[in-house]
Image (cartoon, grey):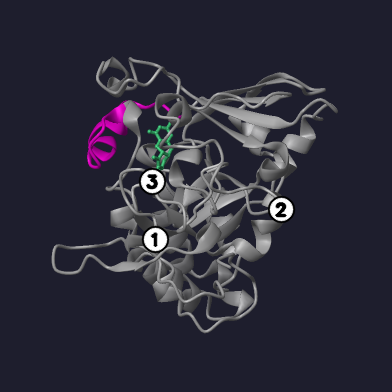
């Protein structure tokens, strides 16, 4: 399981942190020197000033990641380099090529941001992002991330359990599903003007309520110790590590609790190819390609870096119980 724990592990921090951040963290620790007296030393103040200048690493984010200590996951997967995770993206609102989101997502304005919560809840409303986040301690979790297109990454996300958020809005006894919706603003999102995607915007996704409440399901606000880059779904996205990546909807503006299963973008577009459940399953192929293996990024022509895909993306022990008695070939 790839959850970052506080206890010690044998994976060096250099493998789970982009090199620059890691080196700065080491410098910081060296400056701190293990002595509280050093806390006011000029070198330390200078360092934190330099970090404060980096708007992708605000003080609250640094605090969240530092609070995790240098623990590491109990798995041997090496983390995907930051540069791959922010340059090889799917975010059709900014174009359909893998490098389009990085090139075009500057136009997204993630602040201020409002999330509408409605449907089967006791406390519906329009909530400012700050109010959504305020009560939740952030944590870093390193998850395998498997796209339905048969590539994968290992990413250190920063976020908090979705279940903790949903409970605050007091789901009614009728709530059985959660629907999520992405912003759809053609002024900020040039991909919405492309008539060839066939997508009926906004991009929507959904989970069964028990999947949404599962402790592995995260609301994500950062990655690699930084706030989310726009192309990765700033300022708020979902991460469901045992499901194909298309379930992990980006730039969320609406969360609705529902009594019926919601329609979802890819399932609507091609129901024979993309199911509502979309659990990673090497035994159930996509109609046009095998799901038995995956290319772990970074890859190259000479090293496609193939590896076997794991049932539920390796989270079987934690989540298989959610699907007891279900025919996973039918409910793909
Ligand atoms: N969310 C929105 N709104 N639009 C998208 O096109 N693509 C999905 C998912 N979330 C997508 C989205 C797909 S197919 C994948 S694999 C992941 O985002 C990719 O996330 P990443 O770019 O951070 O790796």
From where the camera sits, is residue 142 visible? no
How far from the left and from the top, in percent, is residue 102?
Answer: 27, 40
Q: Residues within 10 Å of mark 3 (few under 14, many from 20)?
A: some
- Label 2 CB, ligand 1: below 8 Å? no
Disc nearer the start of the sequence (3/1) = 3
Q: Position of residue 37 (x, y in %)?
A: 61, 76
Q: State the SS at label 2.
A: loop
**Foreground residue, 302 or 326?**
326
Q: Which mark is residue 286?
A: 3
- Residue that label 1 marks: 292
Q: Residue furthest right?
A: 173
Res 277 → quadrant: top right
Disc 2 designates what residue? Answer: 324
In the picture shown, does residue 236 fall above or below 307? above
Q: Secondary structure at mark 1?
A: loop
Per the model, the C-alpha gap separating discs 2 and 3 is: 22 Å
User: Does residue 103 show up magenta in the picture?
Assistant: yes
Give above or below for 78 relative to 286.
below
Q: Decide: few, some or many residues near mark 1? Use Cα within 10 Å; few <14, some 14-19, many ≥20.
A: some
The residue located at (53%, 49%) in the rendering is: 279
């Amino acid at each position: 399981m790839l959850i970052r724990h506080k206890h010690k592990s044998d994976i060096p921090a250099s493998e789970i942190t982009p090199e620059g951040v890691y080196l700065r963290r080491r410098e910081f620790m060296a400056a701190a020197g293990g002595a509280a007296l050093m806390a006011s030393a000029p070198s330390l103040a200078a360092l934190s000033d330099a970090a404060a200048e980096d708007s992708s690493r605000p003080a609250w984010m640094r605090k969240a990641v530092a609070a995790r200590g240098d623990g590491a996951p109990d798995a041997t997967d090496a983390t995907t380099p930051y540069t791959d995770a922010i340059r090889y993206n799917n975010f059709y609102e900014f174009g359909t090529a893998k490098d389009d989101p990085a090139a075009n997502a500057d136009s997204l304005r993630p602040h201020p941001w409002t999330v509408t919560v409605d449907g089967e809840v006791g406390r519906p409303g329009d909530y400012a992002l700050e109010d959504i986040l305020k009560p939740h301690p952030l944590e870093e979790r390193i998850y395998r991330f498997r796209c339905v297109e048969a590539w994968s990454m290992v990413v250190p996300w920063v976020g908090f359990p979705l279940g903790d958020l949903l409970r605050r809005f007091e789901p009614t006894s009728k709530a059985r599903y959660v629907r999520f919706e992405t912003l759809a603003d053609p002024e900020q999102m040039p991909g919405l003007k492309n008539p060839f995607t066939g997508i009926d915007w906004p991009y929507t996704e959904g989970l069964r309520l028990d999947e949404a409440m599962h402790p592995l399901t995260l609301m994500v606000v950062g990655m690699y110790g930084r706030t989310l880059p726009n192309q990765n779904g700033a300022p708020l996205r979902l991460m469901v590590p045992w499901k194909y990546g298309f379930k992990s909807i980006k730039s969320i503006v609406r969360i609705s609790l529902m009594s019926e299963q919601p329609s979802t973008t890819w399932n609507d577009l091609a129901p024979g190819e993309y199911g509502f459940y979309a659990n990673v399953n090497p035994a159930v192929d996509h109609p046009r390609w095998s799901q038995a293996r995956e290319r772990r990024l970074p890859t190259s022509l000479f090293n496609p870096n193939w590896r076997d895909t794991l049932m539920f993306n390796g989270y079987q022990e934690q989540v298989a119980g959610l699907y007891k008695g279900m025919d996973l070939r039918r409910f793909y």
